Amino acid sequence: MQLAQVNVGRLVAPMDAPEVQEFIDALDPVNALADAAPGFLWRLSADDPETLSSAGDADDPRFVINLSTWTDFASLHAFTYRTLHAEFLRRRLEWFERLSTPVVALWWVEDGDHPSVAEARTRLDHLEANGPTPHAFTMRKRFDP
């Protein structure tokens, strides 16, 4: 089994606005860091047709999604909190609105699986409706495969 993670957000301004430029400029370096991180397996890339067609609300181009898989929780945790990514995570409210629904969900998938955006949305919805369960959980309340 491998760990899938999704995180979503709504930018405070359009992607080409100066208010979010520092975040946008950091995407490629932080994604490259993730790609090279121990335990990283796969991520939905910006040019993937699924990203362009179903990641966000068609009427809301400020909605963004990150979807990836990892070998284990320790690897994802290390990347999230012990790399340059952590600096941007700490500053997320500079670039993203505070949402009333969950913005991160984790779940286990079969080795080699690449979860879809639709599945990720279902996991976020499940987490909102039920709290952390083996079907969808959080970084703080996690479940073994």
Image (cartoon, rainbow, N blue to C red):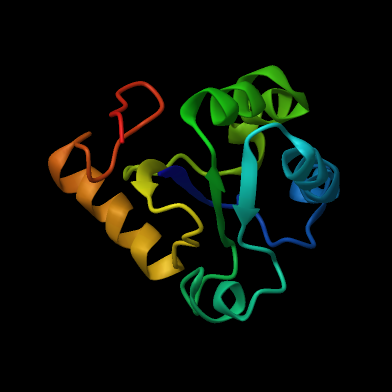
Residue nearest the viewer, comparing 36 with 124: 36
- Horizontally, residue 109 falls left or right of residue 50, namely left
The residue shown at (77%, 26%) is 84
x then y, percent, for residue 136: 28, 43
* Percent coordinates x, y for residue 60 in the rendering: 52, 70
Q: Residue at x 39, y 53 (%)?
A: 110
Q: Quadrant of residue 34?
A: top right
Q: Residue at x 62, y 81 (%)?
A: 49
User: What count of labels does the image hold?
Assistant: 0
Vertical arrangement, residue 15 with respect to residue 143, above or below: below
Quarter of the image that includes the N terminus: top left
Outermost residue toward the left? 130
- In this view, the residue in front, 30 or 57, is 30
State which quarter of the image contains the C terminus. Answer: top left
Residue in the image at 59% along x and 28% along y = 75
Query: Going by the image, does 73 lie left or right of 122?
Result: right
- Determine the image quadrant of residue 16: bottom right
Q: Position of residue 139 (x, y in %)?
A: 41, 27
Left or right: residue 28 versus residue 8 is right
